[in-house]
């Protein structure tokens, strides 16, 4: 195999590849959860959530491909098995649980925010620790997409006081409306 001479050491490339594979695993888990909610949502918001989540999982599918191709461009191999995804992902499945529509939105907000925190850290590590500004820039683009999606999902439940599990909080806790 021809050696890779792109201005990064093997250790730098491997460090970034490891970060990208974690991001890939999280993206795949988020894709599956988004599709599952797309299929299972019921209630008055069915159509709007069904369509919104279709847009989201289409973006996630493109991002998954881009993450895998970035790993290959750096000389690595992307994780590509369910076992591998579950091992590397920071997101968790909620098997056997079909939450309310609001609970689904809240779960996805939590997951996108976790991905945002991870990506923010990975942007810093890619640039500062591994000196790979190309990957840092690439991850910044993904970060911005997840920030937009999280904002859209939070906006959907704006004004509703809910806990992250989709339940109504204790009496007296209100989310300010019209602030």
Image (tube, grey):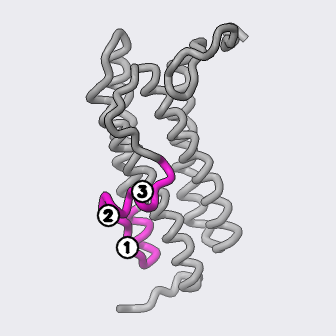
Residue under pointer 1: 77
Residue under pointer 3: 25
For discs 1 and 3, the disc positioned in front in the rendered view: 3
Residue under pointer 2: 80
Percent position of residue 139, x then y: 55, 56
In the rendered image, residue 72 lying in the magenta stretch gets the answer yes
Are the residues at dot 2 and dot 1 in contact (C-beta closer than 8 Å)? yes
Q: Is residue 49 above or below residue 138?
A: above
Could you tell which of marks 1 and 3 lies nearer the N-terminus? 3
- The residues tagged by marks 1 and 3 sit, at their Cα atoms, a distance apart of 13 Å
Element class at badge 2: loop
Q: Which residues are magenta?
A: 68-91
Q: Quadrant of the N terminus?
A: bottom left
Percent position of residue 75, x then y: 42, 78
Residue drawn at x 30%, y 62% is: 81
Horizontal side, residue 62 vs residue 147: left or right: left
In the rendered image, residue 106 lying in the magenta stretch gets the answer no
- In the rendered image, which quarter is residue 70 located in? bottom left
What's the mark number on residue 50?
A: none
- The residues tagged by marks 2 and 1 sit, at their Cα atoms, a distance apart of 9 Å
Percent position of residue 111, x then y: 50, 40
- The residues tagged by marks 2 and 3 sit, at their Cα atoms, a distance apart of 9 Å
Horizontal side, residue 90 vs residue 133: left or right: left
For discs 2 and 1, the disc positioned in front in the rendered view: 2
**Residue 152 visible in the displayed image:** no
Element class at badge 3: helix
Residue drawn at x 51%, y 87% is: 5
Could you tell which of marks 2 and 3 lies nearer the N-terminus? 3
Q: Within 10 angstroms of label 1, few (less than 14), some, or many (20 or more) residues?
A: some
């Amino acid at each position: 195999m021809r050696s890779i001479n792109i201005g990064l050491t093997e250790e730098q490339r491997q460090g970034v590849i490891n970060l990208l594979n974690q991001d890939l695993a999280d993206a795949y888990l988020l894709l599956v959860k988004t599709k599952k909610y797309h299929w299972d949502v019921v209630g008055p918001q069915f159509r709007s959530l069904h369509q919104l989540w279709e847009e989201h999982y289409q973006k996630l599918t493109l991002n998954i491909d881009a993450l895998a191709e970035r790993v290959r461009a750096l000389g690595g191999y992307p994780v590509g098995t369910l076992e591998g995804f579950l091992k590397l992902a920071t997101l968790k499945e909620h098997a056997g649980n079909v939450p309310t529509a609001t609970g689904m939105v809240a779960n996805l907000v939590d997951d996108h925010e976790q991905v945002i925190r991870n990506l923010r850290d990975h942007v810093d590590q890619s640039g500062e620790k591994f000196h790979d500004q190309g990957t840092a820039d690439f991850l910044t683009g993904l970060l911005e997409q997840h920030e937009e999606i999280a904002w859209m999902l939070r906006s959907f439940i704006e004004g509703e006081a809910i806990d992250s599990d989709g339940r109504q909080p204790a009496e007296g806790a209100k989310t300010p409306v019209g602030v």
